[in-house]
């Protein structure tokens, strides 16, 4: 997915780093650990490399030496966080056996666990998706497309093999639709969890959540799912149709 500033002459500094030496991996990992907590608590723009260095008891220049820039540090934090999430096909066997759209339902129903169990990595993913500048966001998009951390490509192939997805659509388009729509809808569900007043205009969230998930999946299935043939029209309806054709 090309992004803003795609005509830059050279890649960002953090993409031109040399491979880390084995003896420095432990230090890099420790920096990422502390930076992850710091970014999650303060956000991307308010986070300061100097504060992260202070918490580690090292010089700020040491962080720049390892990661090139604040962007480079956040990019590594983002990649580690996103890689920690489960892939679509990590759903239980009985859920996979129930089909492609049941796998989607399974993960949507479990969305709240991202807040309660995986708050820090999910917070980092939100910052990367919505709280960074255009250049860094472009590199995040490139990473998501090239690495496919959620296993969306394999999941779509699973749906195609089960004949639950349309074969007249480009597979990359289906992958993109799943990535875009699931990400935004899960964000909406979590926004509702964190700030229920936003979504309680027509009733309590607990009464509406399942209906919203069902409606979302119905819309998605109409867009990318195989469409069953229309049932044969009744005799009366068929007679009216024949009359119109005369």
Image: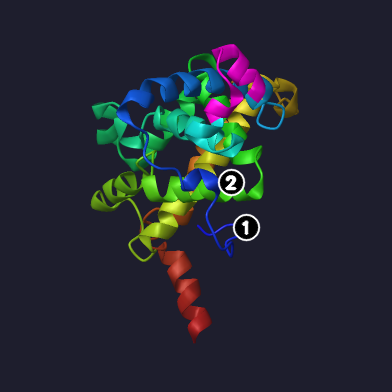
The segment highlighted magenta reads: 50-63
Give coordinates of residue 112: x percent, y percent.
53, 21
Q: Residue at x 62, y 15 (%)?
A: 54
Dot 2 alpha-carbon crowd within 10 angstroms: few under 14, some 14 to 19, many 20 or more: some
Q: Nearer the viewer, residue 189 or 219?
A: 189
Above or below: residue 151 compared with residue 78: below
Query: Magenta residues: mostly which secondary structure?
Result: helix
Q: Nearer the viewer, residue 41 or 174?
A: 41
Dot 1 alpha-carbon crowd within 10 angstroms: few under 14, some 14 to 19, many 20 or more: few
Examine the structure image and report whether residue 60 is included in the region drawn in magenta.
Answer: yes
Disc 2, disc 1: CB below 8 Å?
Answer: yes
User: From where the camera sits, is residue 231 visible?
Assistant: no
Q: Residue at x 36, y 25 (%)?
A: 25
Q: Nearer the viewer, residue 159 or 5?
A: 5
Give coordinates of residue 119: x percent, y percent.
54, 19
Above or below: residue 22 compared with residue 173: above
Give coordinates of residue 131: x percent, y percent.
66, 37
Displayed quadrant of residue 106: top left
Mark closest to the chain's N terminus, 2 or 1: 1
Q: Which residue is mark 1?
A: 4
User: From where the camera sits, is residue 12 visible?
Assistant: yes
User: Marks 2/1: CA distance?
Assistant: 8 Å
Above or below: residue 26 compared with residue 215: above
Model colouring:
rainbow
Q: Secondary structure at mark 2?
A: helix
Displayed quadrant of residue 35: top right
Total numbered circles = 2
Q: Which residue is mark 2?
A: 137
Displayed quadrant of residue 132: top right
Q: Secondary structure at mark 1?
A: loop
Above or below: residue 37 compared with residue 97: above
């Amino acid at each position: 997915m090309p992004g803003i500033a795609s005509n830059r002459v050279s890649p960002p500094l953090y993409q031109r780093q040399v491979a880390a030496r084995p003896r420095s991996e432990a230090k890099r990992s420790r920096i990422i650990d502390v930076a992850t907590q710091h970014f999650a608590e303060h956000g991307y723009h308010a986070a300061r490399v100097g504060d992260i260095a202070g918490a580690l008891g090292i010089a700020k220049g040491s962080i720049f030496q390892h990661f090139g820039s604040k962007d480079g540090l956040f990019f590594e934090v983002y990649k580690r966080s996103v890689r920690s999430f489960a892939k679509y096909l990590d759903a239980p066997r009985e859920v996979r056996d129930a089909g492609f759209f049941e796998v989607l339902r399974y993960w949507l129903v479990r969305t709240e666990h991202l807040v309660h169990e995986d708050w820090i990595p999910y917070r980092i993913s939100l910052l990367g998706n919505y709280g960074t500048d255009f250049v860094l966001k472009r590199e995040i998009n490139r990473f998501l497309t090239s690495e496919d951390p959620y296993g969306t490509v394999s999941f779509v192939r699973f749906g195609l093999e089960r004949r639950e997805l349309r074969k007249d659509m480009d597979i990359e388009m289906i992958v993109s639709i799943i990535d875009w729509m699931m990400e935004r809808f899960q964000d909406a569900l979590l926004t509702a969890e964190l700030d229920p007043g936003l979504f309680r205009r027509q009733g309590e969230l607990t009464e509406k959540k399942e209906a919203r998930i069902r409606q979302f999946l119905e819309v998605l299935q109409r867009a990318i799912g195989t469409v069953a043939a229309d049932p044969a029209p009744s005799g009366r309806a068929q007679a009216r149709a024949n009359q119109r054709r005369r």
